[in-house]
Image (tube, rainbow, N blue to C red):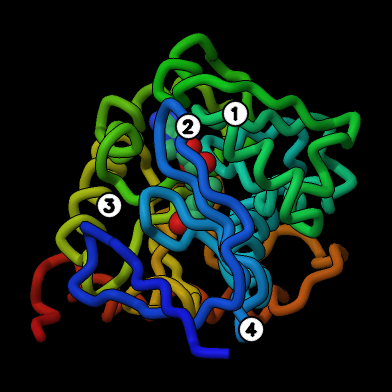
Amino acid sequence: MKDVFFIERDPYAPVRHCYTISKILYEGKSKYQEIMVLESPEFGKLLVLDGVVQLDEKYEFLYHEYLAHVPLHAHPSPENVLIIGGGDGGTLREVLKHSCVRRAVLVDIDREVIEVSRRFFPTLSCSFDDTRAIVVNEDGYRYIQDYENEFDVVLVDSTDPVGFAHVLTTEEFFRFVHRALKEDGILTAQTESIHYHLDMVVKIQNNLKKVFPIVDLYTSVVPIYAGYWWTYSIASKKYSVRTPRRAVEVPTKIYSEEMHKYAFLPENFYRRLLSGEYKY
Ligand code: SAM
């Protein structure tokens, strides 16, 4: 059989990944975005939104474990967690591994992403039926405005900050999150590539610093994301975040107490990155 290729259509990255594809499993268009599910011999199934690969079955843990477990272990007892975006369910799965979590609300604007994930990605969508999970289909920017002193941890697992996801990077949004968090709450957001999107990373960090007393940046390598070296911005009202505050008892593939500490950039490099001294 001849190889068939899928070339990513990422408006926000200077490279285009090209995947060998064995099958197109699903193609559709929701009210918000184009949704595709592709089968790749190397990566397993791929979820593609508006031409951008969001996750692959083989390496998704590298993103979801870091997004969820770093803030959840920096908090002494997270009970009430809000996920904005994350309609594939991977972040929810990681959050609900914590037995202290009593309620996890997932707010994804697009119901169809959840339906597609339930149908094609059982290893990601496996926690939607957990009794502690609440799924809401609404714009996260709108949803958060109704809450005050409600959540221990808020996780932003959104698509690239263009279009309807852009509002999730603004100072106004972070002020709403600050109000919705309890007095010792923590926010983490995926904030794109450390190299290809450095201006965006710096902008988001500066927006967070206007609102939260403790702001930091950690990273993981995600082989399918443009630039590979992916950033997560973390903001905390009270607790330092560079070391876990609880023993790591959840089952993981890569996250551990040691990986938590190594995920954070050395202080000097972090400072140079934000001040613009790190040039390339
Ligand atoms: N891990 C992925 C990545 O970084 O490429 C993100 C995957 S997840 C499927 C992204 C989800 O965010 C999508 O399902 C999209 O519908 C949702 N989303 C984007 N903007 C949103 C908003 N303003 N409110 C709620 N959900 C949003």
Note whether residue 156 is visible.
no
Q: How crowded is mark 2: few (under 14 residues within 10 Å), some or many (20 or more)?
A: few
Residue position for label 1: 111
Q: Is residue 5 above or below residue 57?
A: below
Q: Nearer the viewer, mark 3 or mark 1?
A: 1
> What's the distance in space between the residues labelled 2 and 4, CA to CA?
27 Å
Looking at the rendered structure, which numbered label has been put on residue 30?
2
> What's the distance in space between the residues labelled 1 and 2, CA to CA?
9 Å
Looking at the rendered structure, which numbered label has been put on residue 205?
3
Q: Which mark is first along the chain, 1 or 3? A: 1
> What's the distance in space between the residues labelled 4 and 1, CA to CA?
28 Å
Quadrant location, the C terminus:
bottom left
Residue 259 pos. (x, y %): 62, 79
Residue position for label 4: 41
Residue 253 pos. (x, y %): 76, 77
Count of labels shown? Answer: 4
Q: Which amino acid does label 4 sit on?
A: Pro
> What's the distance in space between the residues labelled 4 and 3, CA to CA?
38 Å
Q: Is residue 75 above or below residue 273?
A: above
Q: Which amino acid does label 3 sit on?
A: Gln
Q: In this view, does 277 lie above or below 98?
A: below
Residue 268 lies in quadrant = bottom left
Q: Which mark is first along the chain, 4 or 2? A: 2
- Disc 4 + disc 3, Cβ < 8 Å: no
Element at label 1: helix
Q: Residues within 10 Å of mark 3 (few under 14, many from 20)?
A: many
Element at label 3: helix
- Disc 3 + disc 1, Cβ < 8 Å: no
- Disc 1 + disc 2, Cβ < 8 Å: yes
Q: Which of marks 4 and 1 is in front?
A: 4
Q: Which mark is first along the chain, 3 or 4? A: 4
Q: Which mark is first along the chain, 2 or 3? A: 2
